[in-house]
Amino acid sequence: MLPDSYAVILAARAMEATKKAYAPYSNFPVGAAVAHTSKIAIGCNVENQSFGLTMCAERVAIYSAITTGWLNKTTKITALAVYAVNQDYVKPCGACLQVISEFADENTVILLMDRSNGPIKQLKFADLLPQAFSLE
């Protein structure tokens, strides 16, 4: 698990990302922060009126890390934080978990927060998606 001080930093970055969310249809802003050692990328959900084209915050954060150049197939993320303005302890959806699986290992930490600055839950990725789809 992560040291509390690092978990608080990632949680704050995920909370910050919710301010950039584009969620006019669901009114459900979500932010995420993905980390590898000292590198952090953030993302927010971006909705589209064709709902299937909506991008979740977790995937946007991962794609941002790839775009900035520090995340690739050989780099494993150490942690991913998720925060929603309207619901406590929101977990990544199945599609996001599958995308995360490309860049995570069983020890990658998923951080979940509530809206009242309560305790940050730390879960192992393998507990959320024990058997991800893989071509290997």
Image: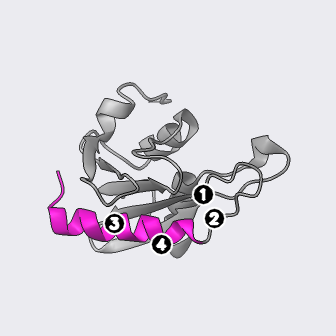
Residue 118, position as x, y percentages in the image: 27, 55
Report the residue that reaches farthest toward the front: 116
Front of the two marks 3 and 4: 4
Q: Which residue is mark 4?
A: 16
**How many angstroms separate mark 1 from mark 3 (CA)?**
17 Å
Bounds of the magenta segment: 1-19
Which quadrant of the rendered structure holds the C terminus? top left
Nearest the eye: 75 or 112: 112
Q: In which image quadrant can residue 124 be found?
A: top left
Q: Amino acid at mark 3?
A: Leu
Q: Which residue is mark 3?
A: 10
The earlier-in-sequence mark between 4 and 1 is 4
Q: Which residue is mark 2?
A: 21
Q: Is residue 85 magenta?
A: no
**Quick one: label 3 or label 4, which is nearer the N terminus?**
3
Q: Amino acid at mark 4?
A: Glu
Disc 1 + disc 2, Cβ < 8 Å: yes
The picture places residue 44, in percent across and down from the top left corner, at: 58, 62
Q: Is residue 81 left or right of residue 135?
A: left
Q: Is residue 77 visible?
A: no
Tag 2 secondary structure? loop
Q: Magenta segment: does it hold 14?
A: yes
Looking at the rendered structure, the secondary structure element under dot 4 is: helix
> Residue at left 25%, top 62%?
7
Give the class, few, some or many, for how many residues have Cα within 10 Å of label 1's Cα (few <14, many ≥20): many
Residue corresponding to mark 1: 29
* Residue 82 to residue 66: above or below: above
- Principal secondary structure, stretch drawn in magenta: helix
Judge depth for marks 1 and 3 and give the one in front.
1
Q: Earlier in the sequence, mark 1 or mark 3?
A: 3
Residue 10 visible in the shown view? yes
